[in-house]
Amino acid sequence: AAAPLTPPSRRMPYAHWLRLVLPYTQHPTAADLNDSIMAEQARRGEAITGRVHYAKWSTRAVYELYQLMRITAVHLPEVTAPLLVLSAAQDQTVLPQDALHIQQQVRSLHIETAVLPQGGHIVLQDVGREAAFAIIGEFLARQAAGPAGSD
């Protein structure tokens, strides 16, 4: 879900060198998102932990993510399993063209796509998470049922 192929920052390729002068960067969670997650945890009777999120990012890890994005793009044609490409319309990290590129490059015979109207990049934690869970569950149920018409 929400797999990036295009670096969200033009500095990402240079993170290998930036790590020498800026080993970490701060990325706090938006208060309203954290509040909604804590409210949902309280509603469910769960321990109130808030959003699981690293507020401090390793610059070296950012470069490793950049490398992973490049490797992933090369190996997309090897994907042949049924595929669900899930994204969020409000995602400011992954570009819509990345989902299209994945669809065009994989060799899966069965590809489904869904765009969540609400939520951002972390689709399973954001406000569109219930819709995401439903879409994923339905996709998995269809895959478990097998090809239409077979018994």
Image (spheres, grey):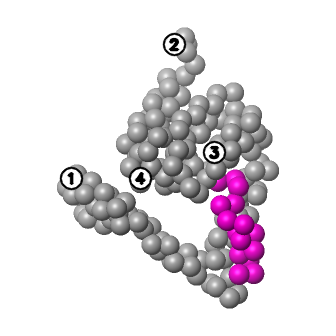
Residue 102 visible somewhere in the drawing: no
Query: In which quarter of the view is residue 68 placed?
Result: bottom right
Question: Residue 3's spot in the image, x, y percent?
Answer: 61, 51
Residue at x 71%, y 75% (from the top left corner): 15
Q: CA distance from mark 1 to mark 2?
A: 41 Å
Above/below status of 138 relative to 132: above
Q: Earlier in the sequence, mark 1 or mark 2?
A: 1
Q: Nearer the viewer, mark 3 or mark 4?
A: 3
Residue at x 57%, y 49% (from the top left corner): 2
Q: Report the residue marked by disc 3.
A: 96
Count residues near mark 3 (Cα–Cα under 10 Å), then give few for <14, some for 14-19, many for 20+.
some
Instruction: Decide if residue 63 is on the left or right side of residue 26.
Output: right
Residue at x 35%, y 66% (from the top left corner): 31
Residue 75 visible somewhere in the drawing: yes
Q: CA distance from mark 3 to mark 2?
A: 37 Å
Q: Earlier in the sequence, mark 3 or mark 4?
A: 3
**Which residues fall within the magenta stretch?**
4-18
Question: Residue 141's spot in the image, x, y percent?
Answer: 46, 29
Q: Tell me which amino acid carries mark 2.
A: Asp
Q: Nearer the viewer, mark 1 or mark 4?
A: 4
Taking the magenta stretch, the answer to whether it contains residue 75 is no
Disc 3 to disc 1: CB gap under 8 Å: no
Is 81 in front, or is 24?
A: 24
Residue at x 56%, y 79% (from the top left corner): 25
Q: Earlier in the sequence, mark 3 or mark 1?
A: 1
Q: Earlier in the sequence, mark 1 or mark 4?
A: 1
Q: Report the residue marked by disc 4.
A: 126
Q: Report the residue marked by disc 2.
A: 151
Q: Report the residue marked by disc 1.
A: 43
